[in-house]
Image (cartoon, rainbow, N blue to C red):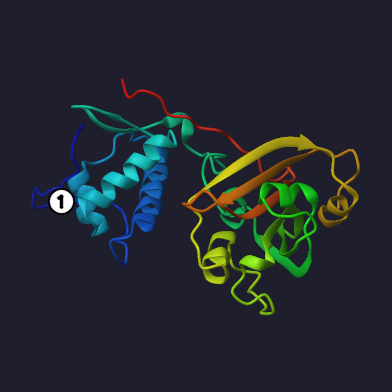
Amino acid sequence: MTVPRDTAGRRAPVPVTPVAADSYGQAKARLRELIDRLGAEGTLRLPPEERLAASLAVSRATVRSALHSLQKEGRIRRLHGAGTFINRHALGITANLAEAGAFVDLLAGSGYEVGLRTSQRSVPLEADVTMALEMPADEPGWVIERVFTADGRPAVLSIDHVPSRLLHDPSSTPDPLDSTFSFVAAHVGRQVCYSVAEVRPLLPPPDVREALEIEADHPLLFLRHVHVHADESPLAVTTAYVNDDYLRFTVIRGYSDQ
């Protein structure tokens, strides 16, 4: 492969925007953008770690961690002694079920103008939610509903459920625009360590049918995430109803490098 060089014969910088700090999340996002851009140009090999680190203005350790995560997602392959290569079959995929992408970003990545309608209330949580949260039946919880629109049409209904007993101040009114993870961090004071997802198709219940403005026979993709703390205690449950007219998920799994 020919290495791009400037007019003085030096290696040209990697075309990525430096991040504001040595941030893993920002570095991973920039690398994903670079992968998409290089893939669209037909270049399937990434520059070495040291060049990426210099261009992003982060440490090699941060770049290495971000590349390892992208490898686990199946977006790149790292071949010992050969380099890091883009998985061309993963190019253009915006909704990877294995990633924790926000619906705003997933819909925007699919080319839609995204809008958001929200509501929230304190109600007794339903039996399947209290079971997932390992709490007594009918215990009150804080529920935040978000309807994500695509070009003005409702595409996704997402509902967060958090036990009221976990909230610092149950009488306060949280910002419904907060993501699930930032909401839990700010109002429960604990970080989500990992999430366990259930995925299945279903026909819409009446309230979901009304929210998404669809017919009773229109199938949806149902996602239920249980968000878990590092001590294995569940913190929140998110249920989402996705109209696949607007958003379809793909699963990318990485295997051996060789």
**Image spot of residue 78 (x, y percent):** 29, 31
Find residue 86 and report its image quarter. Answer: top left
**Image spot of residue 256 (x, y percent):** 36, 23
Find residue 201 and report its image quarter. Answer: top right
Element marked by disc 1: loop
**Image spot of residue 241 (x, y percent):** 74, 47
Q: Residue at x 31, y 46 (%)?
A: 65
Instruction: Give the side of residue 14 with respect to residue 176, left or right.
Output: left
Q: 119 or 210, which lies in front?
A: 119
Taking the view exactly as shown, the residue that stands out farthest to the front is: 136
Is residue 54 in view?
Answer: yes
Find residue 68 and report its image quarter. Answer: top left
Q: Quadrant of the N terminus?
A: top left
Q: Is residue 84 above or below residue 7?
A: above
- Badge 1 local density, few (<14 within 10 Å), some, or many (20+)? few
Provide the residue designation for mark 1.
6
